[in-house]
Amino acid sequence: MQTQTHTTTDRHGYSLRFSPFEANYLLLATSQLYGLAGGGSLFLLEQNSNTNSSSTDGQSLGELCRLEWSDGLFDVAWCPYAADIAATASGDGSLQIWCGLDGESASNQLTPKQPLICLQEHKNEVYSLDWGEKWNYHTLLSASWDCTLKLWDCNRQNSITTFVGHNDLIYGAKFSPLIANLFASVSTDGHLNLWNSLDFAGKPLMSIEAHASEALCCDWSHFDRNVLVTGGSDGLIRGWDLRKMRTHVFELYSGEFAVRRLACSPHSAAVLASANYDFTTRIWNLERGESAQEVNARHTEFVCGLDWNPHRTHQLADCGWDSLANVYTPQCLSGDLVV
């Protein structure tokens, strides 16, 4: 299994995202001192297009540019309609919108060192960020440890709506890719909440106890509009169906440590990846039972970031607190056809 890697010395990985426009580009959001203190750095990385597919030796991802912020960066999201723009979420409660995140600007040192816009309303860390697609192109969704979510218009300095419905730290929020104006959020209160982004009253459509412990992540299926998944500090991954939310429709056990991030594959309806606090990234195939099809133990610290490359079938990236980012195709998927 051929892997490309990048080490961010003194910066600990929290989130990474492949570009929706360029197959070789990805952004990596990091924090100093594990996010407990210090600043943050955003890296624009490029895959080596001349890799030898028969080699399993690690090759380096190219670092095109690096941007600095005064507090830790916990999440990153590409703009869905502009190839060189992205947003980050920070420990100081702000969101930053950056530009010039493309190869030409970076190689000519034209990438601005300061963000275009800084959005500041949250009172605590912003831990999750999602940029609306299809129906919500100009809207950003932020989830914070101040127990609120906010919807932002990128062309305005103030948020559109503040959503209140969790009783504890909010770790993640994601727009549905298949249902207009619907998004989900999870919190350390154990609940999964569903929201209508057009409901300016800011109250949840539905709230269910997804985990008996902290709920840390969620993601939506790219194939079935009714299906989403949650992960918790109980080591459980649970699947939910919007048509019957009384209980989960499937459950996977990822071990005794927390599931920090989930990513449903855009290439296969049955494939799911999880980033875990036992230093592993696990690949699941719901058509092949309840056990992980592959357990990758490449990290020596918590794995926090996870993303599938939308341009390359089954290519996955992960990052962790060990300052290491990896891009690879899981061995269990290397021979699979697109479902």
Image (cartoon, grey):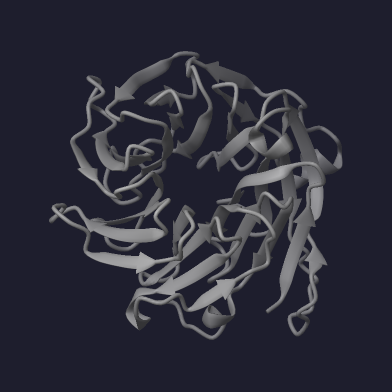
Res. 135 image quadrant: top left
Q: What residue is drawn where x is 49% and y is 36%?
A: 129
**What percent of the width, then of the height, locates residue 310?**
52, 60
Work out which quarter of the rendered image holds the C terminus and state it.
Answer: bottom left
**Left or right for 62, reference 71:** right
Query: In this view, which residue lies farthest toward the right?
Result: 108
**What percent of the width, then of the height, locates residue 13?**
67, 46
Res. 223 image quadrant: bottom left
**What percent of the width, then of the height, locates residue 245?**
16, 52
Query: In this view, which residue lies farthest toward the front?
Result: 256
Work out which quarter of the rendered image holds the N terminus and state it.
Answer: bottom right
Front residue of 160 and 293: 293
Question: Can residue 139 be spotted in the picture?
Answer: no
Front residue of 133 and 161: 161
**Left or right for 226, reference 269:** left
Q: Is residue 272 above or below residue 39?
A: below
Q: Is residue 267 above or below residue 262?
A: below
Q: What residue is drawn where x is 34% and y is 80%?
A: 289
Res. 148 image quadrant: top left
Front residue of 243 and 256: 256
Question: Can residue 166 be spotted in the picture?
Answer: yes
Q: Is residue 40 above or below residue 235?
A: above
Q: What residue is drawn where x is 28% and y is 37%?
A: 181
